[in-house]
Amino acid sequence: MNSETCLRDCNVERSQNKPLAENFAREIEDIWGYAKRLGFVRDVIRASFAGPRVISVLDVGCGNGSQLAIPLAHDPQLRITGIDPDDASIEHGRSLAVSSAKLNFICASIEDLPADDRFDVIILSEVLEHLDRPAEMLRNATRLLDDDGVLIVTVPNGYGEFEIDSWFFRALRLQKIVDRFAAKSEVLAGTDNSESGHIQFFTRSRLKKLFQQAGLVTIRESAGSLLAGPIAGHFVSRSPRLVGWNARITDRLPFVLASGWDFALRLKNPIHRAEDIR
């Protein structure tokens, strides 16, 4: 299904959304540092915008919304738009979401949005590592970012524990063993698109260079969890206390040891946006 068809056929009435499932509200920490990441996003938004005003948020590559769009929709100040090119993920998101005029799911890519749209906050969470041209995504994001807006980017450490652990997991073909002996997981994946793997493996220095080339400056950053791969995660996830420690310990360690990173960025010079930088 192409983007134009998605925009037409997937733009159903928001009032059809079902009530939010109770477990979304609990926001329990996991091996990937879900609660920590959500907290980072909320803290950045609160620190960036003062006063009782509506804040427009664009969640790019939102999947089914369970990771950020839906939890953020609990804040009455936030007007959330979640976009994703995967039809199944968007339809699933609508089935999970609250019935709210401040939460809207659209099946689309960022290129499909009107050029004159502006958002206070744009989120690229676990997106850049899936793209052939991450710099182009950053350019598109800055094009839609308000002059005083904030871009939030979360991305795996391309040479961290998660990627290394995942490589061994695939190389040793451990998925069949896990499928045979592990109990059925009750964890809701953030996307229904299982065909989108990682094709970029970032270092912090490469990310910083991409941000600079896009005309962005970092105003805040945070480390994700320590152990997040499928092998380590099999053991860590057995203990809630260990899961919590796994998310917190990276605050005391060098950034290079974290499995992922979170960044908050602003436009260095809104007059000269990244769309003008070649």
Image (spheres, grey):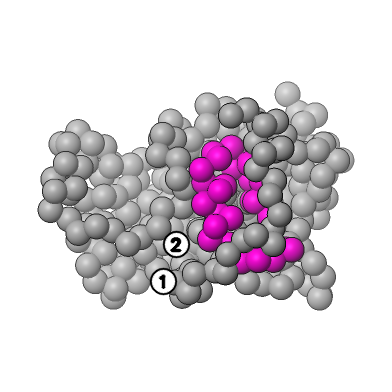
The disc at residue 28 is 1
Residues rendered magenta in the picture = 80-108
Compared with 259, 108 (above or below) is above
Residue 51 placement, left or right of 192: right
Which quarter of the figure is the N terminus placed in? Answer: top right
Residue 44 placement, left or right of 221: right
Question: Is residue 64 visible from the viewing direction of this image?
Answer: no
Res 234 quadrant in image: bottom left
Residue 73 placement, left or right of 146: left
Residue 273 placement, left or right of 171: right
Which secondary structure, mark 2?
helix
Compared with 165, 152 (above or below) is below
Q: Residue at x 35, y 71 (%)?
A: 244
Q: Position of residue 63 (x, y in %)?
A: 53, 48
Q: Residue furthest front?
A: 16
Q: Amino acid at mark 1?
A: Ile
Q: Amino acid at mark 2?
A: Tyr
Res 108 quadrant in image: top right
Q: Position of residue 129 (x, y in %)?
A: 48, 37
Looking at the picture, tell me which residue is in the foreground, 179 or 215. 179
The disc at residue 34 is 2
